[in-house]
Image (tube, rainbow, N blue to C red):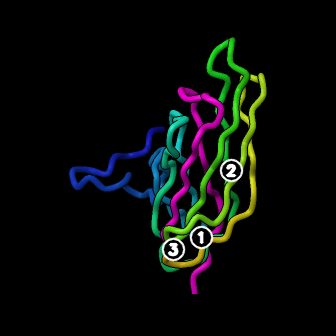
């Protein structure tokens, strides 16, 4: 059975709350949980491409960041190296390196992450070694804690 529509007001489906809205650059809240999915974004070898960008709310986010490196572009390429640049409040805190080989699936690196309340978060990926044209993605999945 299909979920009922939200009607003319443009709201979410009637009787449903916190439904998944698709890949986006922000953090979605689902009760005591939160997630952000960038979706596949084309990499660039000249500059970092922003995948997620948001300001956290009145809560502490405790979760995992998953960074997926670029897939092999064609039968000639050998994969490549992707670097995720994670910034809080405009300051680069750390980088995550994801290296793919000749496999057809992207490599994944996961690590725990804690995001304080009211923090401006930016996660951008750049591609090394001329692997532009391939795709990368970032996921944040975790729990939020409010006072």
Front: mark 2 or 1 = 2
Tag 2 secondary structure: strand
N-terminal label among 3 and 2: 2
Is 107 drawn above or below residue 48 in the view shown?
above
What label sits on residue 119 in the rendered view? 3
Q: Position of residue 145 (x, y in %)?
A: 62, 78
Q: Residues within 10 Å of mark 2 (few under 14, many from 20)?
A: some
Asked whether the residues under the numbered discs 3 and 2 touch, taking CB atoms below 8 Å apart as contact, a structural biologist would say no
State left or right for residue 5 relative to residue 138: left
Secondary structure, magenta segment, majority class: strand
Residue 133 drawn in magenta: yes
Front: mark 1 or 3 = 3
The residues tagged by marks 1 and 3 sit, at their Cα atoms, a distance apart of 18 Å
- Furthest residue toward left: 8
In the picture, which quadrant includes the C terminus?
Answer: bottom right
Identity of the residue drawn at 70% across and 26% down: 79
Q: In the rendered image, which residue does mark 1 sit on?
A: 32
Q: Which residues are magenta?
A: 120-147
Q: Residues within 10 Å of mark 3 (few under 14, many from 20)?
A: some
Tag 1 secondary structure: loop
Is 110 drawn above or below residue 60 in the view shown?
above
Q: Residues within 10 Å of mark 1 (few under 14, many from 20)?
A: few
What label sits on residue 90 in the rendered view? none
Q: In the rendered image, which residue does mark 2 sit on?
A: 66
Identity of the residue drawn at 42% across and 58% down: 15
Q: Position of residue 137 (x, y in %)?
A: 59, 42
Identity of the residue drawn at 75% across and 47% down: 109
Query: Total label count?
Result: 3
Is 118 drawn above or below residue 101 in the view shown?
below
In the image, 129 versus 140, the foreground residue is 129
In the image, 112 versus 86, the foreground residue is 86
């Amino acid at each position: 059975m299909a979920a009922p529509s939200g009607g003319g007001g443009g709201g979410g489906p009637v009787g449903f709350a916190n439904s998944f809205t698709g890949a986006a650059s922000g953090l979605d809240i689902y009760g005591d949980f939160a997630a952000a999915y960038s979706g596949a974004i084309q990499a660039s070898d000249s500059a970092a491409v922003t995948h997620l960008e948001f300001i956290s709310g009145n809560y502490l986010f405790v979760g995992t960041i998953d960074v997926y490196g670029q897939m092999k572009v064609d039968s000639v390429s050998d994969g490549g190296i992707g670097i995720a640049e994670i910034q809080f409040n405009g300051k680069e805190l750390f980088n995550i390196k994801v290296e793919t080989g000749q496999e057809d699936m992207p490599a994944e690196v996961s690590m725990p992450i804690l995001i304080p309340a009211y923090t401006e978060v930016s996660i951008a990926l750049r591609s090394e070694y001329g692997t532009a044209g391939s795709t990368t993605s970032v996921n944040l999945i975790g729990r939020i804690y409010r006072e």
